[in-house]
Image (spheres, coloured by chain):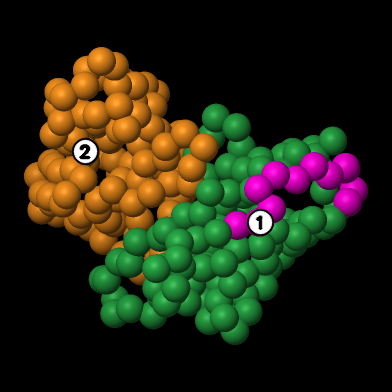
């Protein structure tokens, strides 16, 4: 069973540029969530995709957007990068669509460290 | 946002039990309590979760107070590998997103 993988590991961009981060879900998982983790803080929920549709969004501006593909891999796109976007971006996959009250744990990848200069 | 309160840091000796507290005094009846931990240079990993009853698994035990306003994560025998940031999270029963706080940084020494 392959775990959650993310690419690239590290990335350096300049202010105003655009970036795309990628995530491959764990085998059998149909739900992907993205989180932003600033230094010294806990992860903050950006959005979630379930079967290629956005299924919830946190308090992030529209320049943060995403996609989920038929194989359930996912992309996070950030436009017009700002200095405060520098953070670790985490992707988590899980099995969604379970009966109410059932919790399927989220499996996190190692993250992509984005630095905006 | 769902709010939990945890100590910023704790220390433990290896081989000894560790009790990590979490306060969630405004919890509602449908909120679950989850614990995730984040080892250095890794993404968070699931530890345990519960609603009302105490829970045990191979990693830890979760003790939930009778009034559900607090809970305690118990590591029965801490090892160096348990050094991590431990997050206590409230999750509404119908939601799948996790709302992390700043967690408790656990240091384990020989």
Specify whether B58 is left or right of B4. Answer: left
A69 magenta-colored: no
A12 magenta-colored: yes
Residue drawn at x 18%, y 43% as measured from the top left: B60
Residue B25 horizontal/vertical position (percent): 27, 39
Task: Estimate how packed mark 2 is, as few (under 14), some (14 to 19) or many (20 or more) residues with alpha carbons within 10 Å.
Answer: many
Could you tell me if the residues under marks 1 and 2 are in contact, i.e. CB atoms within 8 Å? no
Task: Estimate how packed mark 1 is, as few (under 14), some (14 to 19) or many (20 or more) residues with alpha carbons within 10 Å.
Answer: some
Q: Are marks 1 and 2 on the same chain?
A: no
Residue B29 appears in the figure: yes
Specify whether A21 is left or right of A23. Answer: right
Q: Residue furthest bottom?
A: A70
Residue drawn at x 29%, y 40% as measured from the top left: B24
Specify whether A21 is left or right of B84. Answer: right
Q: Dot 2: what SS?
A: strand
Question: Where are the magenta residues, as a range?
Answer: A6-17
Colour orange maps to chain? B
Residue drawn at x 58%, y 49% as measured from the top left: A111
Residue B5 horizontal/vertical position (percent): 35, 33
């Amino acid at each position: 069973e392959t775990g959650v993988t993310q690419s690239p590991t590290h990335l350096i961009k300049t202010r105003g540029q655009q970036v795309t981060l990628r995530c491959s879900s764990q085998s059998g998982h149909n739900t992907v969530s993205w989180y932003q983790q600033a230094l010294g803080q806990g992860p903050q929920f950006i959005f979630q995709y379930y079967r290629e549709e956005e299924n919830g969004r946190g308090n992030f501006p529209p320049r943060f957007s995403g996609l989920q593909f038929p194989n359930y891999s996912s992309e996070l796109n950030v436009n017009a990068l700002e200095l405060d976007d520098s953070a670790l971006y985490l992707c988590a996959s899980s099995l969604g669509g379970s009966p109410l009250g059932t919790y399927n744990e989220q499996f996190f990848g190692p993250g992509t460290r984005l630095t905006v200069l | 946002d769902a709010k939990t309160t945890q100590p910023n840091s704790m220390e433990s000796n290896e081989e000894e039990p560790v009790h990590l507290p979490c306060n969630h005094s405004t919890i509602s009846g449908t909120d679950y309590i989850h614990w995730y931990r984040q080892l250095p240079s890794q993404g968070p990993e699931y530890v345990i979760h519960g609603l009302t009853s105490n829970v045990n698994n191979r990693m830890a035990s979760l003790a939930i107070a009778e009034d559900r306003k607090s809970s305690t994560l118990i590591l029965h025998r801490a090892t160096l590998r348990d050094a991590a940031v431990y997050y206590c999270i409230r999750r509404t029963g119908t939601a799948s997103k996790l709302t992390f706080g700043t967690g408790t940084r656990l240091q384990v020494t020989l």
